[in-house]
Amino acid sequence: MKETNLYAESLKAKILISCYLNYPTKKLENHQKNDTLRVLNTIAIIIFIAALLALIVGITIFVPGTPLDMIWTLKNSFQIGFRSSSTGIIFGYFIVILGLILISAVWGLLKRMKWAWWVVLIVFLINGIGDVISVVFRGGINGISKIIIISAFIIYLIRPSIKKYFEKNKI
């Protein structure tokens, strides 16, 4: 009888100790999860804004004469007549498709889809390579700041905890 009481007492002690020891780690895990969600949501919002801008620019190529045309007067590094040229039309299709891909990637990020993580990572890498090339050939602090920001996004996305966050939904 004493042996079963000892066993029951030791079992209770083990349960209490494991509950006590696991409590802080679970609280820490929840805090880390909230931080992860906050940062990923911020990245998703930034990508969503970029996608909307890409769609707007693409639409202004195909539908000139709208109030959205003021975008082309704000910062226009293209030649006059670019929008009506075949290169401009190809650029318009490209930018609209990119905008649609980014919007679907935002949806995928919010749903923890692994493919969305890959899409966002690839887009950031291509953007970063373009910024590096721009700085090398044109120089300027503007390009360097873009490289720093894009590098921060890439470094954050490739962290093991973030990759693990997207492992749960591999679709």
Image: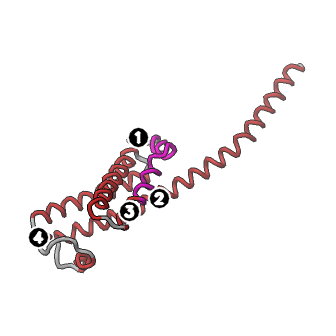
Secondary structure at badge 1 equals loop
* 63 to 29, vertically: above or below: below
Q: Residue at x 40, y 46 (%)?
A: 113
90 sits to left or right of 168:
left
Q: Which residue is mark 4?
A: 84
* 47 to 23, vertically: above or below: below
Q: Residue at x 57, y 54 (%)?
A: 34
Q: Which residue is mark 3?
A: 144
Query: In which quadrant will I find the N terminus?
Result: top right
Q: Which residue is mark 2?
A: 41
Which residues are drawn in magenta? Answer: 148-167
Secondary structure at badge 3 equals helix
Q: Mark 3 vs mark 1: which is more N-terminal? A: 3
* 43 to 29, vertically: above or below: below
Q: Measure how far apart labels 3 and 1 are at the Cα level.
A: 34 Å
Residue 45 position in % (x across, y down): 42, 62
Q: Measure how far apart labels 3 and 2 are at the Cα level.
A: 25 Å
Dominant secondary-structure state across the stretch colored magenta:
helix
Q: Mark 1 vs mark 2: which is more N-terminal? A: 2
Q: Measure how far apart labels 1 and 4 are at the Cα level.
A: 42 Å
Report the disc number at residue 170. 1
